[in-house]
């Protein structure tokens, strides 16, 4: 009896002391990048597609090998991205069955075992209910951006945040500065939100999105 008891205790203690490892990583401009940003003198692997099914995002071979090795290990890989569900489904990560959890929309949406986490969704809905709705923010923002002589792609992403993309004047530092200044001026009167920027892209986010 004593021997069985001690063996049971050892097994329970071993399970209790087991350490779980998690690896969180952004997707775009970290693991994959667009065709424009990819150096094709290096070996690459397709990582994502357009809505029309065309290849438009790529891994470098070494990065893909690293991710494949990580997924095959006992480390839990959790993609963390600004992409929404539809855009995420156009990446190779969505087809990888070993990826069980995903953070989307700057943390606005979480997938667990491939399904939307309802508990987190309820929490986010309650948080968004306390601030000005994203579509109303967009309406106010247009009044500012329309005063600029700049063509931008501006859209609401699933009511989680506003995306502003300098698609037609890529890498024009003057225009980027002008847009950024206008956005900061706008946010000075909309302090429930903050500005995220990455290269030619901006996003207006609520404070609880990261």
Image: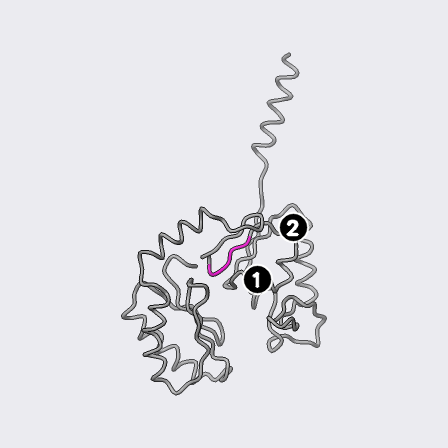
Q: List x then y, in percent, for residue 95.
A: 65, 57
Separation of marks 1 and 2 at Cα, in angstroms: 15 Å
For mark 2, what is the residue? Answer: 98
Is residue 27 a member of the stretch shown in magenta? no
Toward the left, the furthest residue is 189
Q: Which residues are magenta?
A: 102-106
Q: Position of residue 86 (x, y in %)?
A: 55, 63
Quadrant including the N terminus? top right
Q: How many marks?
A: 2
Left or right of residue 89, residue 171 in this image: left
Give the residue at mark 1: 88
Please name the residue shown 52% across and 64% down the image: 83
At horizontal 35% and vertical 54% (from top left) the residue drawn is 127
Of labels 1 and 2, the one closer to you: 1
Is 104 one of the magenta-colored residues? yes
Q: Residue at x 60, y 32 (%)?
A: 15
Q: Main secondary structure of the magenta part?
A: strand
Earlier-in-chain disc, 1 versus 2: 1
Image: 129 above or below 6: below
Residue in the picture at 59% in, 36% down:
18
Q: Quadrant of the C terminus?
A: bottom left
């Amino acid at each position: 009896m004593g021997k069985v008891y001690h063996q049971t205790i050892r097994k329970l203690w071993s399970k209790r002391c087991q350490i779980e490892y998690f690896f969180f990583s952004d997707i775009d401009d970290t693991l994959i990048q667009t065709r424009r940003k990819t150096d094709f003198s290096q070996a690459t692997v397709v990582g994502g597609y357009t809505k029309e099914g065309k290849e438009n995002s790529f891994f470098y071979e070494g990065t893909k090998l690293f991710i494949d090795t990580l997924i095959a290990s006992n480390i839990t890989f959790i993609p963390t991205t600004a992409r929404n569900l539809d855009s995420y489904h156009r990446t190779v990560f969505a087809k990888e069955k070993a990826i069980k959890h995903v953070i989307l929309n700057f943390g606005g949406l979480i997938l667990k075992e491939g399904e939307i986490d309802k508990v987190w969704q309820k929490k986010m809905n309650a948080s968004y209910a306390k601030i000005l709705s994203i579509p109303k923010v967009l309406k106010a923002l247009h009044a500012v951006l329309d005063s600029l002589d700049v063509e931008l792609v501006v859209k609401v992403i699933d009511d989680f945040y506003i995306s502003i993309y300098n698609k037609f004047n890529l890498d024009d530092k003057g225009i980027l500065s002008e847009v950024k200044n206008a956005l900061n001026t706008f946010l000075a009167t909309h302090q429930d939100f903050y500005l995220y920027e990455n290269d030619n892209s901006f996003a207006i986010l609520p404070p609880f999105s990261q």
